[in-house]
């Protein structure tokens, strides 16, 4: 299994997961031209992607999904509520996946979990290789850590986890009070502190990577987010790598521990 974060933040989100010859996108929050450009930097043709699963209907997660499926022949998956609130997905014959359900693809299985966010029926996703058992969890856009979120993040080999804002920066930041309250709510976005606590709680021997995702450009700082996470993980048995998902760059490939899949070293490429 190999994973790339193609972009993460309020301007667009997409995670590419490769298991053997199968390639899966979790979210496609970029237009097809931007997505194709980012895939080109890592030598991957958009038409080689088997499927795209959309976590919820917000534009920074769904923008290019229907157009990409039409242009390159992907299969599309999303929850019932997401499809109902996104006409372009319905027109693209998106398959509705029940929350808690599993989709079996050629070399992977996709399992969905409920997450608390202000969308119709948002999900987090676990993608598991059927040949090696290695898995990647994508868990972003959530206001608090529910039991379902804990179940999603447990036993991940690669964890892409929202670390959206620093609490102090949020309340001192440029957003109007109603927006600050929405972000900080139980259906908003996860703070650095809460993300670090969750990651600390789900550490296990095979956790190889924690990628901090969906960082706010106005209410967070890469150094603060990374330090908050690494300090929390330093008090655990975690011996993997911690990195930041970039809004305007590609991060990867991220690999499971030896014995769970083979590959190359990690890199980050600014665009």
Image (cartoon, grey):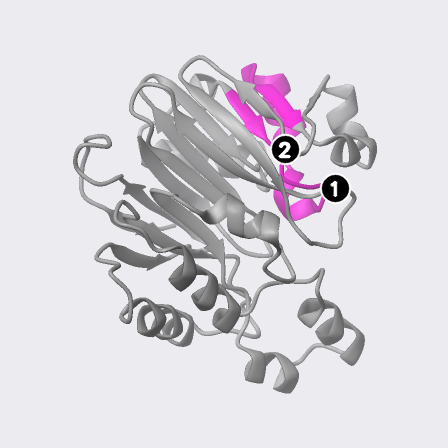
User: Magenta span has 183?
Assistant: no
Instruction: Give the camera-side residue of 243 and 198.
Output: 198
- On the image, which quarter does residue 128 sit in? top left
Give me the C-alpha separation between circle 2 and circle 1: 12 Å
The image position of residue 35, as x and y in percent, is 50, 36
User: Mark 1 Cα within 10 Å, few/some/many (few <14, many 20+)?
Assistant: many
- On the image, which quarter does residue 43 sit in? top left
Residue 146 horizontal side relative to residue 217, left or right: right
Q: Badges 2 and 1: C-beta atoms under 8 Å apart?
A: no
Which residue is drawn at the image coordinates 57% and 79% (left, top)?
Answer: 167
N-terminal label among 2 and 1: 2
Q: Which residues are magenta?
A: 51-77
Instruction: Give the camera-side residue of 242 and 200.
Output: 200
What is the count of numbered marks? 2
Q: Which label belongs to residue 100?
A: 2
Q: Is residue 172 above or below residue 206?
A: below
Which residue is drawn at the image coordinates 36% and 74% (left, top)?
Answer: 223
The image position of residue 93, as x and y in percent, is 73, 17
Q: Is residue 105 above or below residue 110?
A: above
Which residue is drawn at the image coordinates 49% and 70% (left, top)?
Answer: 192
Q: Which residue is mark 1?
A: 121
Mark 2 element type: loop
Instruction: Give the camera-side residue of 255 and 38.
Output: 255
Mark 1 element type: loop
User: Mark 2 Cα within 10 Å, few/some/many (few <14, many 20+)?
Assistant: some
């Amino acid at each position: 299994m190999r994973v790339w974060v193609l972009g993460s933040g309020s301007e667009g989100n997409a995670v590419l997961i490769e298991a053997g010859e199968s390639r899966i996108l979790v979210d496609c929050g970029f237009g097809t031209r931007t997505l194709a450009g980012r895939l080109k930097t890592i030598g991957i043709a958009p038409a080689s992607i088997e499927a795209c699963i959309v976590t919820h209907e917000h534009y920074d997660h769904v923008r290019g999904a229907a157009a990409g499926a039409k242009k390159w022949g992907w299969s599309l998956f999303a929850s019932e509520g997401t499809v109902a609130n996104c006409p372009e997905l319905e027109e693209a014959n998106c398959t509705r996946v029940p929350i808690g359900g599993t989709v079996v693809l050629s070399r992977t299985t996709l399992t969905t979990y409920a997450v608390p966010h202000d969308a119709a029926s948002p999900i987090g996703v676990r993608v598991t290789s059927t040949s090696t058992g290695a898995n990647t969890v994508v868990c972003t856009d959530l206001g608090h850590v529910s039991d379902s979120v804990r179940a999603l993040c447990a036993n991940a080999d690669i964890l892409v986890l929202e670390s959206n804002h620093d609490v102090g920066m949020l309340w001192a930041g440029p957003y109007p009070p109603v927006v600050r309250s929405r972000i900080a709510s139980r259906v908003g976005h996860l703070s650095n502190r809460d993300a670090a606590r969750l990651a600390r709680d789900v550490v296990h021997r095979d956790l190889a990577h924690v990628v901090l995702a969906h960082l706010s450009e106005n209410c967070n700082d890469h150094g603060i987010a990374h330090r908050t996470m690494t300090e929390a993980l330093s008090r655990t048995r975690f011996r993997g790598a911690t990195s930041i998902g970039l809004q305007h760059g590609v991060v990867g490939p991220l690999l499971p521990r030896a014995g769970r899949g083979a590959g190359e070293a990690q890199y980050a490429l600014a665009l």
